[in-house]
Image (cartoon, coloured by chain):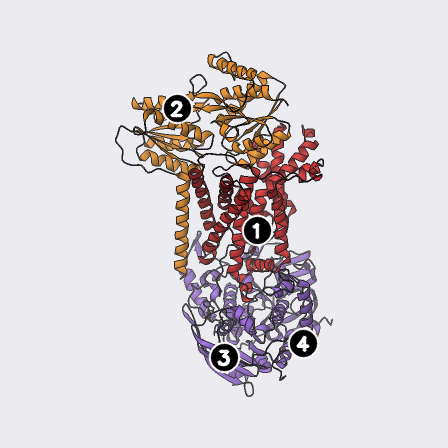
Amino acid sequence: MSDSQLLPTGQKKINHLEMIEISKFFPGVIANNRVNFDVKAGEVHALLGENGAGKSTLMKVLYGLYPPEEGAIKLDGEQVVIGSPVDSIGLGIGMIHQHFMLVESLTVAENVALGLASTRGPLTDLDIVSQRIQELSEIYGLQVDPKALIWQLSVGQQQRVEIIKALYRGAALLILDEPTAVLTPQEVDEFFLTMRKMMDDGHALIFISHKLHEVLDISHRISVLRDGHMIGTIPVEGATKEKLAEMMVGREIGLKKERVSNEKSEKKLILKNISAQSDRGTPALKGIDLEVYSGEILGVAGVSGNGQKELAEVITGLRNVTSGQVVLEDEDVTGLSPKELINRSLSYIPEERMRDGMIKEFTVAENLILREYDQLPFANNGFLNLKNISTHSDEMIKSFNVKTPSQETTVKSLSGGNIQKLVLARELFRKPRTLIAAQPTRGLDIGAMEYVHLRLLEQREEGTATILISEDLDEILALSDRIAVIFEGEIMGIIDREEATTERLGLMMAGVVE
Amino acid sequence: MKKIQKTLAMLLLVVLMISACGGAENEATVVEVPADIFKVAVVMPSAINDLAFSQSMYDALLAIQADTGADSFEIVYSEGMFIVDDAAAAIRDYASQGFDLVIAHGSQYGSSLQEIAPDFLETSFAWGTTVDTFGLPNIFAYEARAEEGGYVNGVMATMLSESAVIGVVGPIETGDAKLYVDGFAVGAAATDAGTEVNTNWIGSFSDVALASEAAQTHIGAGADVLTGTAQMVVGAIGAAEENGALWFGTQSSQSSLAPSIVVANQVYRWEVVLEDMIDLIHGGTYGGQSFEITLANGGLVIEFNGDYALPADVQSAADATIAGIIDGSISVFP
Amino acid sequence: MIEKFFTEAVLVGIIASGIRLATPYLYASIGETFGQRSGVLNLGVEGQMLLGAFAAFYVSLTTGNLWFGLLAAMLTGLIMGLGMAFVSINLQAVQGISGIGFYLFGLGLSDLLFQKLMGTVVTVSGFRPIYFPVLSDLPIVGQIFFNHNILVYGAYAMVFVAWFVLNKTTLGLKIKAVGESPEAADSLGVSVSKIRYLTISFGGMMSGIAGASLSIALLNVFQQNMTSGLGFIAVALVYFGGWRPIAVMGGALLFSMVNSLQLWVQVLNIPIPSDFAVMMPYVLTIIALVVTVQRVRPPSALTKPFERGH
Ligand SMILES: Nc1ncnc2c1ncn2[C@@H]1O[C@H](COP(=O)(O)OP(=O)(O)OP(=O)(O)O)[C@@H](O)[C@H]1O
Ligand SMILES: [Mg+2]
């Protein structure tokens, strides 16, 4: 750690930030209950907790997005009032949100420049901003094209923009709300390099993650929240996964299910020589051939942005192919609408669940029937059967352990992980014959993740053909029967689970042909 | 807090709406009056001072009131009722308030009236311009033989046009607008077959901007004399004035708008037929007849603008034409 | 028949009058573009125009100074815009409905004031076409481009100002961000309500000028409901133009040119029923825009009130 009171960016360090006795209530929920939390310059303080424990809420209080019901914030010993992000940014606090705060129709540079004074007065200085972005991305290893439009970027790339945005503002304290949830293992390594560099420079970092090994790897101290209460803060020395898990859940978790070998029978889904374009109009898929059998999980491993999104969208009817054929249950379904594919018992768990999977203004119950709202038992002759819908929602909320005040709550006020659970509940409930799952456990706490794995394996035993798109190699290895690796829109090879190792997959993901 | 905001917002909106309606309808409140007062209500598509269709009716009612005295003749009006549903509601309202005569001044109100009138057999209704009473005993129909004044204006316009091109701006090709425009063309052709009469139907009674542009188009095509009908022609008159083209008006007197270029106006004097209707109502007949205003019965009058120096030969040709139409020696649509 | 069309006088007439007719649309729809770009739909444009038209006319008539009239129209529109901003931002009212409320308010109040203060239709001597030495006398070009009043030129200037502000300034960046993702803008310290207040009151002011361009520059009269739906067409042009000033101008010009073309069709006695002729601008504008302009997504937050934490 450097001893200077200034960061390399010229910003003053935040030596010690304390949150004291913070409480925050929402209708029907106590999200934070007299929580104490602090972070120092040059350290990474991890914040753990189940979905809905109140982590994001605590951080939004710190960033000035929510006024707390009670409590105080002290910066280097002095009490400060943070009424809005203007205040927190002014104090040197930056936040990377769990759900990106990016303007999709604007470019990277425009997103970074937004709200900042320009060197040219009222005129934008995007060229200068772009230059500085290049500098920052070189220092911290965050490659991104300043001229690209946000909506064209992969989730991982968008993440980098968020980090650059905060660094650009000279944040001395950085709140990272589940930054690694969207990154590949390699990207996580790079990201940790970035974090360590910032740490050495004297930044204070708050790190939220559901991945315990990451937390143990990078943090100095670890705090655990449960149901809005601070359970405790421990130093990383002596902490173990088991201990953290128990602090989080309050019990031991043991949902592990063994994969049983399964007779794979008929071919459910065949992709023949599929090519498709990305949103930018560049080739994203180049002659993909895949076959998925019923009762099989086919893992698709790869670094995000190599065509996974387009692959899922082509199969589910959301994107047109430029050539090739999709065959579902012996029938050519190329070019059919999503609705027609749903009727053929195809389910899709999209990667961008906040955007593609949910209607934020609708209630939990309404979102749970988004697909079958017009069918029995939820509707009859065009009338909704509210009783059945309500019973169904209660069941789903219970079995997926969704933390929500009620089924009438609108989805926008749920925690990130709980929104994921809702999408999963809806898609898996249908017992689909074919399932496309993109990053299904991203952002889930360990309990929920185990539960999803359990459900995917159960479906497999019942004969569902599943394509599991994931960057999490542990997940791929734990669930898949066969693993296909995708790189720059091409399948690098398909290997059986038994022959796959992390190293071998890692090489293929980097484009090394078998 | 949010509830309060929403309520406040709704309240504000209601206030806005009320103030808006108050402005648009300008309804006079009806006070209890002795039975010997004759009460008339009129519903009009545009403003009472539109220098055109609506004003012609309003002026007529004022003329009757000036004759009979304000204490025995009461007028209530709803103007700017270009939305037919609103007009229908107003008509029903007046009928249920016990007015002696409810005038639906606009042919677009016909079907509403046909529905409403049977519910109020003690109330007399009048609507125009049309000849159709729907066979109902309490509906009078009234119409203007606008082609007569159109013909006279056409004769004068042709004599005054040096370029031998005349422009006409009309709203929609129906009703008295069509009668006027057709009569104008016949009059022009009878005077000089070589004069070109170009007509522009702009598809709107209220689009002042398009009427102005239509007039400019005529002028661009060489016209030096213009005429037009309906309330949006104020835009056309402005354009005519700016370009020094002459103007012939109809429905109401438009001389005040551009004294230097308005030559003459065909003015509607609805009081001629209204007085007949009122007499019938007093005698117990509430409808079933149709009326028309003509040059002969004095319901149509050609009013010359005193500020415009009309050449004597044109004046005498106009006078001769008027006399010819009145005595039947000239028939506009033979 | 058709060959009559391709005479110089007709073509020049069509273009010149198209340029002139587009003026009120341009002011109103450029103002509306700013509002919608920031996420607020203002359907009260027509009402703002009517009050602006009246204010401009009445003040010009009584003071004899057209500039005072223009100023009055701007102020009137500004006040209406502030009202709309208050209702949609502070009270979070449903924007479509409150816009209609403001339309009816403007329609009613302008008529009421007209009755009470003026009583009858009169004329005022409005802004005259500007004479540019040499240029105005040029054949064809002079008639098309150098024979308009100041407000016509102002309208086109505003299109480019709007383009510049939206694309080249930090303010434009904020406006776009607020309309696309108010959460993101808010998280970077951009005040969503401040930006929206700014755009909507500016939009109101522009609608006021649009009204003035009718009452004291193009027509020089005021009449009840004289805008006759023009404000609503201006809102539609914003959608057609895909929220981009230059394309909005294209739409306005196309609409106006076809309108002046249909006037010529009738004047030249080309045998098309007048009912069809008057539909031409609407039909052709829609077809042309469907064919040529690729669909653009509306601002994501359009019509959605913003509240922090949701
Ligand atoms: N804006 C809001 N309105 C109402 N309730 C909210 C709102 N934001 C969060 N909550 C509730 O507060 C609780 C804590 O949510 P929070 O987002 O802080 O959880 P989290 O710990 O970040 O969970 P995750 O790991 O799933 O992101 C949840 O029960 C959630 O439903
Ligand atoms: Mg969270």
Looking at the picture, do discs 3 and 1 lie on one chain? no
Say which residue label 2 marks: B271
Q: Foreground residue, B317 or B130?
A: B317
Q: Which residue is drawn at 30% across and 28% down?
A: B72
Which of the 4 image quarters holds residue A97?
A: bottom right
Q: Foreground residue, A318 or A239?
A: A239
Chain identifier matching the red colour in the rendered picture:
C
Q: What residue type is labelled 3?
A: Glu
Q: Which of marks 3 and 1 is in front?
A: 3
Say which residue label 3 marks: A78
Looking at the picture, do discs 4 and 1 lie on one chain? no
Colour applied to chain A: purple
Q: What residue type is labelled 2?
A: Glu
Q: Foreground residue, B193 or A467?
A: B193
On the image, the x and y values in percent for residue C304 come to: 50, 57
Residue C142 shows in this picture: yes
For label 4, the SS is helix
Q: Mark 4 lies on which chain?
A: A
Q: Residue at x 55, y 59 (%)?
A: C178
On the image, the x and y values in percent for residue B85 come to: 42, 38
Circles 2 and 3 in contact, beta carbons < 8 Å? no
Chain identifier matching the orange colour in the rendered picture:
B
On the image, the x and y values in percent for residue C124 come to: 53, 36
Say which residue label 1 marks: C33
What is the CA distance from the residue labelled 3 to the residue labelled 1?
46 Å
Q: Which chain carries label 1?
A: C
Residue extending farthest right: A513
Q: Mark 2 lies on which chain?
A: B
For label 1, the SS is helix
Say which residue label 4 marks: A499
Residue C43 shows in this picture: no
